Amino acid sequence: MPCCHVDFAFTESSDRAFTVGMPTFTFGAGCLAEAGEQAQELGLKRVALFTDRNLKESAHVATVLAALKAADIDVVVYDEVVIEPTTASFKAAATFAADGKFDGYVSVGGGSVMDTCKAANLYATHPAEFMTYVNAPIGGGQKVPGPVKPHIACPTTAGTGSETTGIAIFNLTEINAKTGIISRRLIPTVALIDPNVTLTLPRNVVAATGFDCMSHALESLTARPWPRRLNPARGVSRPVSQGANPFSDGLATEALKGVGSFLVRAVNDAKDIEARTEMMYAAMLAGIAFNASGCHLPHGLSYAVSGLARNYHVSDYPESKTLVPHGMAVVLNNPSVWRYTAPCCSERHVHSAACLGADTRDVNAKDASEAGEALAGRVIELMRAAGIPNGLSELGFSRNDVDALAAGAEPQWRVIRNAPKDVSRDDLKSLFSAAMKYW
């Protein structure tokens, strides 16, 4: 396969169009108190506030509730969101939303909360059999037929970027793998991004979500270039994941610079407000970037890891079930992927490594082996500094699981086909094998 071009030129031809979708957002300390004003501007009278049980009594939820009530908004709290949502939790949330007859939604929480709110809003607004909107080929992949109700998203973690995307991810229990729903219609109407909320996050949550942010940016920069995507539609018919493009490139680059400088600091010191603020900002930038470009192999591989893990638990996360935090599942596949994709766009891999803080002065950017190792090596350095497990083997996987992991990842073609090269089942097996242990 020929190398992808590093520099893209704008063109008027319809097969090279790309479309950007994003919310109106406010980034700044104290902005959660604007929730009531924003709801009034949207004409909302009765809203559902989505959160989880861990956050229900938090100052963050209290601030948003007080602001909504001060604006005379009728609020009903839904705190049954499941961390790492499932088919059942999405369906339960959708039932609640449909029964409540709300004219708008507010989410206060991490990616699980915001994604659950998106799905509930969708099914309450446009009722359908559950698999109708789920990504093909796993689900029906049908387009959302029209606008959904307004959604004010208030993220409390720095990494998922869900406040800026039209993507809702969940674990489809029938196949024991993650998938999702994707539509520009699902992008929150307003995002209120207050970096101060991250001061209460424990280190393992900061690490997992921070690496999710990093991978969003890396995958945006190394995705299949947008002129090579098969869907040339314009406007709202344009797919959300369009391949690497000039808009996503700039945002992803800035996000990586932030991650390289501040991720480890943010993990190691909860009082480092500068580091946690910069990671919140990087997460927002990376979210906008990957919403425009799409993710690829690290996310495609991660869904099988999350679904097939057994008897694994990370401190700072709910203890009632096996759970591999999404960002951890993503980053554990990163180094093996970058060594594999470097031949397609080696300059971009070196650029990414440099943005993350690697010394690339002696790296030959045209040498795929050197380029892939530069990026993989820097990611491994960050993993070790942040206390991430040494590959999939530390989650309990072995080479005996490679076939099952590849089979679980293969249906994720929505993201896998966004990689800069075509990927076979044997390639997937090789990638999982290489991700078992890194040091």
Image: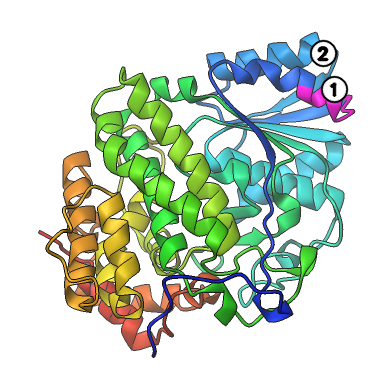
Closer to the camera, 386 or 353? 353
Q: Is residue 352 above or below residue 8?
A: above
- The amino acid type found where label 2 is placed reads Ala
Q: Is mark 1 on a helix, strand or loop?
A: helix
Q: In which quarter of the image is residue 274?
A: top left
If the image is split into quadrants, where does the N terminus sit? Answer: bottom left
Judge from the rendering whether residue 79 lies leftward or rightward of residue 185; answer left or right: left
If the image is split into quadrants, where does the C terminus sit? Answer: bottom left
Judge from the rendering whether residue 243 lies leftward or rightward of residue 391; answer left or right: right
Is residue 110 visible in the rendered image? The answer is yes
- Residue 40: which numbered mark, if any? 1
Q: Residue at x 62, y 13 (%)?
A: 62
Pointer 2 and pointer 1: residues touching (CB < 8 Å)? yes
- The amino acid type found where label 1 is placed reads Gln
Q: Gap between marks 2 and 1, in whole Å?
A: 7 Å
Q: Is mark 2 on a helix, strand or loop?
A: loop
Point out residue 292 in the picture as x, y percentages from the top left corner: 59, 59
Closer to the camera, 314 or 60? 60
Judge from the rendering whether residue 310 lies leftward or rightward of residue 178; answer left or right: left
Q: In this view, does 197 lie above or below 48?
A: above
Which residue in the structure is indicated by mark 2?
71
Range of the magenta residues?
Answer: 38-45
Q: Residue at x 56, y 57 (%)?
A: 247
Point out residue 322 in the picture as x, y percentages from the top left corner: 37, 48
- Residue 21: which numbered mark, if any? none
Judge from the rendering whether residue 122 lies leftward or rightward of residue 256; answer left or right: right
